[in-house]
Structure formats: structure tokens, C-alpha cells
Amino acid sequence: MASSPQSSEYSRELVVRPEVQSRAPGLAYLEPLQPLPQQEEDAGGLPALWQILRAHRLLILLGGVICGAAGLGLSMIETPVYEAHTTLVFQSNKADAAGLGDNPDAGLTPESYLATQVRELKSLTLARRVLEKLKKENVAAYAPPDLITKVRALVHLPAPGSAKAPPPHFPPVDVQVKVLDISRLVEIDCASPDPQFAATYANTLAQEYIDYSMESVWLSAQRTSDWLTRQLQDMRTKLEQSENQLQAYTRQAGLIFTGSNNNVDDDRLRQIETELAQAQADRISKQSAYEIASTTPAESLPQVLDNGRLSDYQSKLADLRRQYAEQSAIYTPAHYKVRELQAQITDLENTLRRERTNIVNRIQSDYQAALKRERMLQAAYTSQMQRVTEQSQKSIYYGILKREVETNQQVYEQLLQKAKQVGVTGAVQPTNVRVLDAAEVPLKPSQPNPARNSAIGFVSGLALAFGFVFAGEFVNRSLRTPGESAFHLRVPELGVIPNKTAVQDQVLLPNILPVKAEPDAPTKLELVTWQDRPSLLAEAYRNALTSILAANAKGRPKVILITSPGHGEGKSSTVSNLGIALAEINQRVLLVDADLRKPRLHDIFNLPNSWGLTDLLREKSSLRDCPLEAMARKSEVDGLYVLPSGPGTVSITSLLYSTRMAELVDRVRRDFDITIIDTPPMSYLSDARVLGRLADAAILVIRAARTTRDEARAAKQRLVDDGIRVLGTILNAWEPKGKARYGYGYSDGYYGYRRHRS
């Protein structure tokens, strides 16, 4: 036994079985003694993106180059744009220009205040003021060249003599206003094809903004003064009227208020309500005691049991009864001592009875008194409530009048204060903004930037090409890579069979496993496990067999059905190679060709098909006594038997439904270690579903890049609905060097040995 670690997480051990080596010299059967770590599903992660990028790198790079060249070409014909910058400084916005303290911007945070000023700088009103001022100052106009002129200049063609220059006008200008970092500095960027006009427009915009701010402050102060004068006179009249109405209504309603502005009747109602709540609680307590006393024997009442004097009486009575019992045992009832004790007992019992009766009467009296007090307080509460209700209706209107007076008083005082401030100030303060840096004429254009445009075009082309490639990859719903079937079907993936052309020259462990005796002889894919034992393809089938034999949660299956969702997905190749791999480990194996419409196992093993499964199902003789040679044909592989399909028939389904099919399955269970049944595709025929009920488990063969998720999911669901145990899937014809998403590969490390041809 040799052991060689393959990773830090697990190791594989090579076991050379003696019985296999004696039957097939030179063959070492690889069997993992510890299970390999399961490949995680990351179909949508970075490894998938990296594999797609590698597979289509040339196409993606071509898209980037084309878009980069387009960006460079557009930069050559684009009109140059010059940028001029002006910086403004804003002071605090807490006070208004007139010193009134009611500046609408005073309540704003510095960030929101600066954002408001930025919107004003970009307003249409301010832009119109700037253009009007430039027209008055006769700023030189500019005639931008058209596209045809630019192209002619780019290719050095002379301009046509008949072409007329466009009429001059102000060049286009793009204004951007932004706040610099976390400061009170605001930068005005003006971009235009004319560098002189860009600088002039930026400086004019800053100056017009300052003038506009000062005009706004002055007009606001004037409007405030006029409005305050009018409102002050109106509020004086309203205040006098509201005060007169309040006083008149107070005298008419006869309302009396305490020092806390509360009504006397309200205070009295709250007092009665408190006393009533206490009386109700007291009445409930005494009523409870009374009801207990009425329904319970007097000697069991808590008041009686807790009474110390009655407890003494009880003790004395018990003592007298004890003495009476003692004397009665000695003397006759007529004896004076006995009569004396009897008299004392009778007197004490009468005393106890009177005391208990008094306690019960006292409980009843307390309850009656509490009930009477509660009723009196309830009547007083009802009477006071009616009075308070009448007073509250009057107090509501009184409160309305009082709030109106208070509101008018506050407004009048504020207006009076503002009016005095406006009269005292009399002048407008200067604006809180100034120019920090004036704009200068730019010497070189800011746009276009050929290098940046080319880089943006190149990156955009890469992203666009990758997007198209990525969309095309994921629009295809076929199962292409290992792990996808396990993820979508929720069943184990038992094995992955690579494409024969991708791994036909690769072998495993050439020092232990010899190469073929005839390396140039053609190898049939269906017999690769037998004809080319050291190859990677053969080892892939053995790996799948290891997974099948390890799937023994419900016991190792003895009858396995192998089917596929569609045709041409490699069922027969899988059946034959799994049978050969089983025979290599000294298993007695039977391959049943149940694909009665398109049989292939007899061609694979070069056997006649003149007699087979259909003949066994049509015969009437008992299958229990049928000799093995009449049931199966021995193949060239030691330990492997094949039951061909036999001659065709028109009643295939009825044969499979017959009881002889079940008898046949029971017979092969006894004679063979494992039986593998090859069935037609499930998408077209029901044969696999019929035979699946007789098998221990079923395996789905899926062909990479052909079988879709929907087909595989539908086939698996049909088997599950029929109560058939689905052991797992086998991915066939996978392309290791293709668009793999999981990083599988056979070209490096452990799988890096090539067959040396002479």
C-alpha cells in the first residue's frame, strides 16, 4: 500500500488488489480510502467569470480595441473646450442684511445654505442678466466651425471658396458650480470653445451674482418695512377687540378660576372622584368579607380564627371536655363533679356562639355602612359632574377667546419690535459674498483628452464585449460543467466523464500503470475501461463506480437502471464501461440491454442478437429453472455477462409490464452481484419508468452542453414521482479545456502525464 498526499485537506491512498492484478496484470485499481472533498457550487462566482474571460479573451480584447479607436477618432474631430474658474467666498448666513434677524437663510445649515446659493448661481434669471450685460459691453462674438470644416482640417483639405462663414454669435458655454470640499468656497467653472469668452463669462457671472444678492437684500428690507407698518395697525385693532370680548363673556358666564387658572368646580369634582374610588374599594373589601361570612360557618371565618380571645375560649372548652371525659369514666352523670363540668362546658359554648354571632353581625354592619357611604358619594359625584359639564361648555368658549387674545398679543409685540428695528437700522448691510480668485484666460483646452477618451473607450469596449459574452453564456440553459446537475437536480453527481478527444493522450501514474501494448490501435469509447485501462477516460469511469458503490445509505443497489433525458447522451457507453469496471473488482456483473428499439450492447461486445430479452419475456417456461447460459452471454471480459435485447417486437411495453420481467429481475439478483439495465431515453419513451420500479436505483446520464436543465429536472422528477430511487447523475462528454466554471483540468499536476509514443 502506497500513500501520497494530494492536498493539505485530504490524501488519497492507492490500493493494488491482488485478485485484480492476477486477472489483469499491470492494472492498479485506484480507490480512495477517504472521500474527496465535495466540490462547492460557485456557478455565479469569480471562478465562473474568470473562466468565461479566458475562453473569450480575444473577442473581449477586440471589442476594447475597436471602442478605444473610436474614442480616439472622436477626440480628433471634437471641438476644443477651454475652462475658466472663479472662486467665491461666502460668509455666515445667520443675520439678514437689515439686521432684523429674520433672514430666510438663517435657519439653514452651512451645507444646505451653500447648496441654495449654488442653485441660484445656475438659475436662468442670473444667466439672462449676464448675457444682457455682455451685450451692453459689446463683448466680441465667436463663430464656431462646423463638422465638415473640422474634418477637412483634420485631413488637410482646402476649404471650398463658395462656403459662407456662419453668422457670429456668443459661443456655447457650460457652467458648473460646486462647493470645494467642506469649506465655504464655491467654484464657478465655465467651459466654452472661446477661451476669452469663458473667462469673461465666469467673472461677469460672479459680479452679477453679488449685485443680485445686494439688490435682493435691499428690496426685502423695503418690503418688510411697508408690510410691518400695515400689519401693526391691524393687529392693534384686533387685540383691543379680542380683549373686550373676553372680559364681557367672563362677566356674563360668571366663571371663577383659581390661581392656577383651573375652575373651582373642576377641583371639587376631582376631590369627590378620589373619595368615591376609595369608598368603592372599601365597599368591595367589606362586601367580600360579608359574602364569605354569609356562606361559611361562623367557626371557619378568618375573623373568628384570628381572634385571640376566641382561641382562648376554644382552648378552655377543649380542656373542660377532656376533664369531663375523665370524670365521666370515674363517676356517674349525677355526680356533682360531672354536673359541674357539664355546666361549665355549656356556658363556654354559649359564650363562643355569642361571640361568633357578634363578629358576623359586625361584618354585616361594616358592609352596610360602606355601601351607604359609596351611594352618597356616587350621588354627590353625579351632581357635581352635571355642574362641571355645564361649566365646561362655557369654559370652551372662554378658552377660545383667551387663546385669541394671547395670540394677538404675541403677534402685536413681535410686529412692534420688528418695526422699531427697521426704523432704527435704516441702511442695508453689505453682502456676505466676495470674489476670492477671478477667472483668467485658459491657455490650453481641457477637452478633448485623446488619451482619456481612448482609455474610456477601451474599458467600455471590454465591458460591453464581456457583457455580451456573459449574457450568451448564461442564456444557454444546458448543463455544461461539473456540479451543475447536483445544484439544479438536488441529487449527487456520481462522476464526470471527459470528452475522449480532450484526454485521449493522458494517462495516470505511468510508473505503476503501463500504457497500452498497442498504442496506435483504435480504442472504442464503449470499451475504453478494458482496452485502455491506464487512460484518464477509464479512470473517470472507475471514479464514477466508486461513487456508486459508496452510495450505500439504503444498502448497495444490486439492480441499477441507467437512463438519460434524451438520445445520444452516452447511456450505452456508460453501461458498458461501468460493467467492465465492476468486473475488474471481482464482481459478477450482468448488463441487460432493455433498449428494445435501438439496442447497442450486442454490437459493443461483438455478440449475436438473435436471442435475448424479448425471447425470455415471451417464453412460458419458468425462469427459475432456466440455465444461466440460456439467459446471458459471456463476454470477453472475465466476470461480465450480457443479456442482449433480442429480436424486435411490436408489443415492447406489454412485455416490460409482464410478470416475467419481475421474475427475471428476481432471478438475476440471485445469480449476479450487480445487474445494470440499459434503457431508452425518458423524454420519448416510458420503458425506463416501467423498469425503474423493479430496480433498486436509477442513474441519469447527462451529456455536457446538450442536456438542458429543464430536461434533466423533468426526467428526475418523473422518476421521483414514480417512487424510484435516483442514485445520482453522471456528466458525460465534458470538455475539460472548454468553458469550465469550476476549475477542473487534466493538464497539470497529478493529471499531467502524457502517453509516450514510439
Image: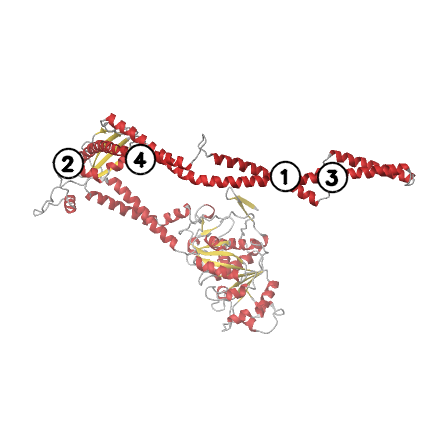
Element under disc 4: helix
Circles 1 and 2, Cβ within 8 Å, touching? The answer is no
Element under disc 3: helix
4 or 1: mark nearer the eye: 1
Residue 722 visible at all:
yes
Q: Which residue is rendered at x = 50% and y = 43% of the image?
A: 7
1 or 3: mark nearer the eye: 1
1 or 2: mark nearer the eye: 1
Ranked by sequence position, the earlier of labels 1 and 3 is 3
Count of labels in the image: 4
- Which kind of residue does numbered mark 3 sit on? Arg
**Residue 517 % position (x, y):** 48, 55
Mark 1–mark 2 Cα distance, whole angstroms, equals 101 Å
Q: Which residue is rendered at x = 7% and y = 48% of the image?
A: 162
- Which kind of residue does numbered mark 4 sit on? Lys
Q: Which residue is rendered at x = 30% and y = 45% of the image?
A: 460
Q: How crowded is mark 4: few (under 14 residues within 10 Å), some or many (20 or more)?
A: some
Compared with 342, 724 (above or below) is below
> In the rendered image, which residue does mark 2 sit on?
134
Mark 2–mark 4 Cα distance, whole angstroms, equals 53 Å
| Outermost residue to the left | 161
Q: Residues within 10 Å of mark 1 (few under 14, many from 20)?
A: few
Please tell me the numbered disc located at residue 238.
4
3 or 2: mark nearer the eye: 3
Ranked by sequence position, the earlier of labels 2 and 4 is 2
> In the rendered image, which residue does mark 1 sit on?
369
Please tell me the numbered disc located at residue 356.
3
Compared with 547, 328 (above or below) is above
